[in-house]
Amino acid sequence: MPVADEIQSSWADEVEIDQGALPPPSEVVENGLKIVTEYKYDNDNKKVKIVRTYKIEKRVVSKSIAKRKTWDKFGDSANDKPGPNPATTNVSEDVSMQFITSKEEAQRPDEGDLEALKARPTKVLFKCRTCQGEHWTSSCPFQHTQVAQAKANEAAKAAEAKASTTNKYVAPNMREGASRGTAREPPGARRDDLAAIRISNLSNFAVEADLDDLVKGFGPVQKLYLAKEKSTGQCKGFAYVHFKFRADAAKAILTLNGYGYDHLILNVEWSKPPQSN
């Protein structure tokens, strides 16, 4: 009897068998090129063959880079061969950078600098205020002599004549015929602070109108100041009131100190206590 033909498997069985273990990756080096072939499954569960070609180049690098290339690999690449592994390493193009101090310095021409310095006119950088010589005023030989006094008088007269001809503002004590000395107030002098009071423990929602209604019954008020926050515009909790007469200020302190206003107890006192004679 003739031998029966062997039963051949169907293409579906071959596909299932073919989808088993993937072939191992291979590397081939020829003509200065390194060809890496590997297999994997894509998102549709289909076998895909990936071929990568690398050009082998020899470059001269610094000692630190050459030493770093000799380090042992670690992590997922601990058992990899020399060179980058595409599965764990992203290889990109080299980026060259040029560092300069500023654009103006890079664009400035180098030629002509010496000629430009030579072409500059020589100017006197300093001049004596006493004799108008080319030296410092502190080292002037006529500093403590009659020549210095005469030069100072001439400079003052020239300044007054220039000010009168140019229609510029001249201070009253610098005008012709005015006394040079000006009366100054002593350090402890106060003008309208003698009738000023300080009101504290105000509500954060207080406004100038509330403060005016609070103090206008005691007498004429010259000035009101309500301290406010810059960011929110709300009251900081204190204010200053300048009365025209000191007696009115004293009456306001006597009445408002300890007065309940807007669910708070006010504290009223002199803004600057008067000095005892």
Image: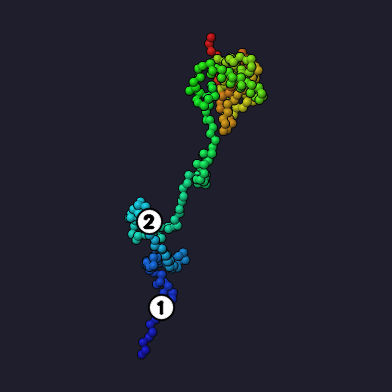
Q: Residue at x 53, y 9 (%)?
A: 277
Q: Secondary structure at mark 1?
A: loop
Vertical comparison of 138 with 11: above or below: above
| Residue 60: assigned label | 2
Question: Dividing the picture into quarters, in which one does residue 16 lie?
Answer: bottom left
Percent position of residue 22, x then y: 39, 68
**Which amino acid does the dot numbered 2 rest on?**
Val
Percent position of residue 32, x then y: 39, 65
Viewer-nearest residue: 66 or 195: 66
Viewer-nearest residue: 256 or 15: 15
Viewer-nearest residue: 151 or 217: 151
Q: Residue at x 61, y 21 (%)?
A: 158
Vertical comparison of 43 with 209: above or below: below
**Residue beneath disc 1:** 9
Q: Residues within 10 Å of mark 1 (few under 14, many from 20)?
A: few
The answer to whether the residue labelled 1 contacts the one labelled 2, judged by CB atoms less than 8 Å apart, is no
Vertical comparison of 97 with 48: above or below: above
Which of pointers 1 and 2 indicates the residue nearer the eye? 2
Q: Earlier in the sequence, mark 1 or mark 2?
A: 1
**Which amino acid does the dot numbered 1 rest on?**
Ser
Tell me, yes or no, if residue 187 can be seen here: no
Percent position of residue 175, x then y: 63, 18
Tell me, yes or no, if residue 7 can be seen here: yes
Q: Residues within 10 Å of mark 2 (few under 14, many from 20)?
A: few
Percent position of residue 183, x then y: 58, 14
Q: Residue at x 53, y 26 (%)?
A: 127
